[in-house]
Amino acid sequence: MEIAVDVRQLVKVYEDKVRALDGVDLAVEAGKVFALLGPNGAGKTTLMRILTTQLKPTSGEAYVFGLDVARDGAEVRRLVSYIPQEMSVWTDISGYENLLIYAKIYGIPSTKRRGIIEDALEKMGLSEVANHLVKTYSGGMVRRLEVACCMLVKPKIMFLDEPTIGLDPSARKVVWKELASFKREYGVTVFFNTHYMDEADLYSDEIAIINGGKIVKLGTAEELKRSVGGEVILFSLEVNRVGEDCLGKVRRVSLVNDVIANDSELSVVVKDAETALPDIMEVLRKEGVSVKKISITKPTLDDVFLKYVGTRLEYGERISEVRQVRDMIKRG
Amino acid sequence: MDSLRNILVMIELELRRLKHDRTELYTRAVQPILWIVVYGPIMSLVKAIPTGSIPYTDYITPGVLIQSTTFVSIFYGLTIVWERDSGILKKLLVTPASRYATVIGRSMASGVRAIFQALIIVPVALLIGVRFIPDITYSISALLIIFFASGGFAATSILVASFMKTRERFMGIGQAITFPLFFASNALYPVGMMPPILQEFSLVNPMSYIVDAVRGLTISGDLANLPIDLIAIATFDATMFVAASACFKKIIE
């Protein structure tokens, strides 16, 4: 198993005052999509900027594919692509020209340049507007152009800082669809920061929650949700009462945490509903209890966030702030 | 090799931007044209400034030219501040291009802008009767000097942008740099006319050397000081390139 990102006891203190990172430990497997979730000021962007060699850590170590980001910056920069939170393309030249400039910076040979650029534009659905000035693009198109830019060099790892913040849901979906197909094709590792729970849930293989400069929880979306305490299976029964004997047997089913009977309803708290359900059904069937309806309530990542960070993730204000910055940038 | 390529890419970027929008060059040309078309001829009538056998408007034309190209370069830092705000600089610093190549490349890109600025002003000067030395080698040499000197000033502005992180502060400091450089140089009058303290200052003022070199190559034909001028410009450029590159990372911190 190759490790793409390895972070050990990483600390970053700004101007001897603000402790943005307070001993981060993290390992990301190569080829995975990794999401870093956290409230504003949690240290997400600082961590990403250290990993992309923009900032030096105050103490601790960070490696990207085994290269020390503080010492081997030039080598690290050959492996990574990065999309900053704000905007990373020039708005007063065309989309094609932006890719051409970056292709030259990355030293793509002139014989291959045109083909690679046209391919990236086509994949991102930007061929038709390739020669338009970027200032005429919508927010989603600008983001797709930035992703196209990352694709030019077939990086080993992509760092995306809030890749879809401020975009409407359909534009977000398009960006992720293209990122996913790029990842499938080239096996690139994706490390992204986000405010959107649904994106972390849908698109990541692993999630870390960062708060106060520390990783407070790490795992797959399912693991995180389970860690909240469990899922509830609610049975609506044909009978009005279930005997104590039957309840005892349900309690003894593995993965069951608690059983609450209330007239014709039976609530069972379990660690993993999908695995426990067949066993519980088997017990109820043997006991002759017929079931009318079953519903499963699962904890969401919002609940996970609430548990580990102590607040719900507020992003309305942040999104409008980012939109304002983007509009300002586009106006030039 | 990679660094040279990246410097050229930055120059290409600037040419592409100019291809799409040249408004700034035209609006910035208004002020120097007023100096040449209004101030020059009026001051010539007074005959208060000893410029030898050279008509006063001819005398100030290289100075005004350098002042305007310096303005373009000093305010190039605004582009850098904008790129910092927009995220482009963060992205550029995560590419394999070295900081030196990025800083020198962006500075020389401003030199390209400066040459275009000069090419707008020169025809106006010709129209009102300024007589340039009709020697193509001299003219090209003068343009090259403007190109490299502007790069030095743009590096100065990148250095300033690394510390002044908002546009408003940058505007203020930009004005505070350019006007003293202009007035404490030989752009509008010979250094000998200045109070002694300003004469001392003009010795370390790069603009004096640039104006002297360009005036020698385009108007007076006096190239006696050219080697010293070139050494001064090269020293200024090298110092600014190193200082701006060293501080460049600060701009995104």
Image (cartoon, rainbow, N blue to C red):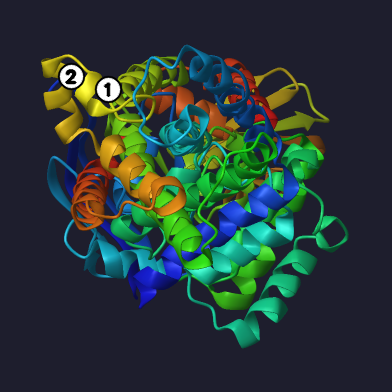
Q: What element carries label 2?
A: helix
Residue B14, compared with residue B200, is above or below; it is below
Give the residue drawn at x 64%, y 21%. Answer: A324
Residue B48, compared with residue B105, is above or below; it is above
Q: How crowded is mark 2: few (under 14 residues within 10 Å), some or many (20 or more)?
A: some
- Relative to residue A219, is residue B201 drawn left or right? left
Give the residue drawn at x 43%, y 17%. Answer: B47
Distance between the alpha carbons at the discs numbered 2 and 1: 6 Å
Image location of residue B209, percent across then percent down: 27, 42
Q: Earlier in the sequence, mark 2 or mark 1?
A: 1
Q: In terms of depth relative to the viewer, which is nearer, B216 or A36?
A: B216
- Relative to residue B103, is residue B134 drawn left or right? right
> What type is the residue that disc 1 sits on?
Ala
Q: In terms of depth relative to the viewer, which is nearer, A143 or B20?
A: B20
Residue B184, labelled with which disc? Answer: 1
Residue A264, compared with residue A107, is above or below; it is above
Q: In which quarter of the image is residue A172?
A: top right
Q: In terms of depth relative to the viewer, which is nearer, A284 or A222?
A: A222
Quadrant in which the C terminus of chain B appears: top left
Image location of residue A258, percent across then percent down: 49, 30
Residue B214, compared with residue A14, is above or below; it is below
Q: In terms of depth relative to the viewer, which is nearer, B85 or B15?
A: B15
Image location of residue A33, percent across then percent down: 51, 58
Q: Residues within 10 Å of mark 1 (few under 14, many from 20)?
A: many
Same chain check for tags 2 and 1:
yes
> What type is the residue that disc 2 sits on?
Leu
Give the residue drawn at x 53%, y 22%. Answer: B40
Please report, as a chain letter, where disc 2 is located.
B
- Tell me if I can see residue A182 in this picture: yes
